[in-house]
Image (spheres, coloured by chain):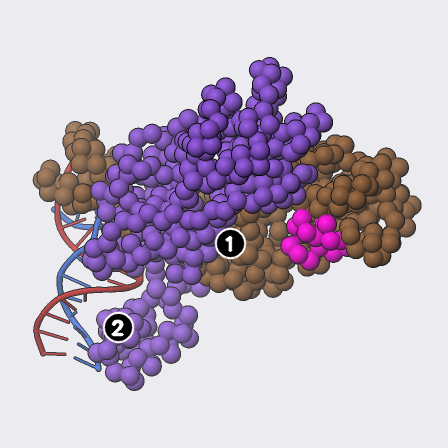
Chain colours: A brown, B purple, C red, D blue
Amino acid sequence: MKPVTLKEIAEKLNLSITAVSKALKDYPDISKETKARVKALAKELNYVPNSFAVNLRTKSSKTIGVIIPATVHHFFSNVIKGIITIAEEHGFLVILLQSNENFELEKKQIDLLLNKGVDGILISLSNKTNRYEHLNKVIDYKVPLVLFDKIAKQVNCSKVIIDDRKASYNAVTCLIKKGYKRIAHFRGDLNPQNSIDRFLGYKQALLDNNIPFDKNLVYVCNNNADYEDGYANTKKMIEVDKIEVDAVFTITDVVAIGVLKYLNDHKIKVPEEIAIFGFSNWFMSSIVSPSLSTVNQPGYEMGKTAVEILLKEIKNKKKNIPFDYTTIVLETELVIRESS
Amino acid sequence: MKPVTLKEIAEKLNLSITAVSKALKDYPDISKETKARVKALAKELNYVPNSFAVNLRTKSSKTIGVIIPATVHHFFSNVIKGIITIAEEHGFLVILLQSNENFELEKKQIDLLLNKGVDGILISLSNKTNRYEHLNKVIDYKVPLVLFDKIAKQVNCSKVIIDDRKASYNAVTCLIKKGYKRIAHFRGDLNPQNSIDRFLGYKQALLDNNIPFDKNLVYVCNNNADYEDGYANTKKMIEVDKIEVDAVFTITDVVAIGVLKYLNDHKIKVPEEIAIFGFSNWFMSSIVSPSLSTVNQPGYEMGKTAVEILLKEIKNKKKNIPFDYTTIVLETELVIRESS
DNA sequence: TTGTACGCGTTATCAG
DNA sequence: CTGATAACGCGTACAA
């Protein structure tokens, strides 16, 4: 089962390697007849080009690298699916790396991908990332780069995001319109843009509706914004801080489910006593009781859009066509359910 | 920012390319002095070997391919995390592909990986896969192959699994011990080994405890064994078929959550009227009310074990050390919670 | 229409 | 200790 090479085909057909190579690629300067002979034999022998050699020659690998903070989040699973699917349709394979919210690891992984010779890189930044030399290095190397979801505005490249601030503003406004007045916010880490924007949207919505902003109503989810954060923060808010609220707006659905669990466990009625509003539209939020109001965040589409931009940049770069960086903002919408 | 090559270093140092190459790889036949000079300059110029060239020369890419049916399942997310993490620690990168439970796609993806020249392949089969030429092709090409989770016994290669039959047997036995007698089973598709084994475990547990097997108590989850399946099957069982049961054992936690949702919606008390037992120990099963009894299925560890075996086979193959295929069976345990 | 010859960047063999 | 030289398999400008 030794792989067949151009050379072998050439020998069997008494042709030069060049002729065979050209014939297979339908160069106009090869006779129809030889093309047919070559192709027939190639098919018969099951010829496939050695991609290592092709890579070396063409200086491209038909491979893109993807770095995400975590795969286990349902949102990222969908993004990945979008990326992989579309990339494959265009003949590109995807190398997946996970930074685990670790800045140092993220830097190392960028280097790994660069050394591997990927044709482009897609990345969603870790929460800890606050310097960008590694990304600028990618740009210096002229390797197309697209940031998605968790981005840094300072970096000069294409981006795919949602308008976190607006989405968050709309969610909180919706709560206010329904009469909720003391709205807590369980925010994410202090560093990520995401988390900042959602917080700012929350704040703005309050101010625009003449509700004073009260920093005591803001709790930080340090534990990676997961279920525990929601539960623990609710517990602290109610049992320790004895703060009374009539609604909670969370950075994430999983956190919201933590809140819900606490409230359910303590027979606090949702939404009568306290309403909940999540973010991301994880499928579980439609299943829990009461079902959760949330913001729909299009994961698959984000992945799809990000690769599409990346592939276009890769193509343009190869043809030496200059291109501008774009920032695509995907639409989100409110999903109103029982919890608000 | 042009990449530096061995040649350039050689020229600047008035050495041969060979000497430089050897120096960098610490060959014993290069003087300490030259080694030092070469390494110093290499570091200064930021030399990194061109991996395309290395691949071509060494006929290996330090890359492994992974095919899974779906990323969105929490279980597979964990497996992937295990694979990626361990592979990276050993200097291997991972190309991820998703078959979407589609046999044709799976075949195509195997070819893609083979053509890419990955050093090994890890695969969890799609539910539709019932022929194995594509896997045998991998073996013919002498590319190390490890099956995990959804495997085919017929294929001659290493495997990492859990003992589905035993796990299932234990779960059902546990239900019986607690006094449940009419236990329904919501099984998976008819084809996958997984699904068959869990069904057989269920059946065996009944027989061993003198409970007659009743095929009317078995429902198939055709819809990819997800939430909808659980809900719809419960509805059908109760409303249409009017079958009375005192417990339901499901192929998966998500299905179990569907069952739970229906029962909660219809004020049927869990576990007093109907008990539920799931499979996989998804983190949501500890959060829903009542929390779900389930079988813990070690995803991360499965991924980790599978790559470790694969990497060992890759290494042995390179050194021409013969090796035997192994089948590792990972331990599962019952997690008893409120629903049973 | 076909073939020659060279280069891609590295590694391996062998001679000095 | 060091360095030619030959692969690895393919692509392409140029010559024939």
Gap between marks 1 and 2 measured at Cα: 34 Å
Q: Nearer the viewer, residue B115 or A272?
A: A272
Instruction: State the residue at coordinates (34%, 58%).
Output: B51
CB under 8 Å between callouts 1 and 2? no
Is residue B105 shown to the viewer in this render? no
Three-letter amino acid code at disc 2?
Answer: Lys
Give the answer, above or below, for where B33 lies relative to B235.
below
The crowd level at tag 2 (other Cα within 10 Å; few <14, some 14-19, many 20+) is some
Q: Residue at x 62, y 61 (%)?
A: A128
Q: Quadrant of residue B129?
A: top left
Q: Position of residue A151 (x, y in %)?
A: 62, 52
Same chain for marks 1 and 2?
no
Residue at 17 percent of width and 36 percent of height:
A45
Q: Is residue B49 left or right of residue B261?
A: left
Which residue is the site of mark 1? A98
Residue A43 x/y as whole percent = 21, 33
Residue A246 lies, in percent from the top left, at 86, 43
Q: Which residues are magenta?
A: A215-233
Residue B26, above or below B270: below
Image location (x, y in percent) of residue A101? 58, 57
Residue A40 showing in the rendered view: yes
The image quadrant that residue B45 belongs to is bottom left
Q: Is residue B245 left or right of residue A17?
A: right
**Chain name for mark 2:** B
Mark 2 lies on residue: B22
Outermost residue to the top: B240
Looking at the figure, which quarter contains the C terminus of chain A?
top right
Specify the amino acid type for callout 1. Answer: Gln
Question: Front-most of A124 and B71?
Answer: B71
Parent chain of label 1: A
Q: Which is closer to the viewer, label 1 or label 2?
A: 1
Q: Identify the residue at image location x=62%, y=43%.
A: B337
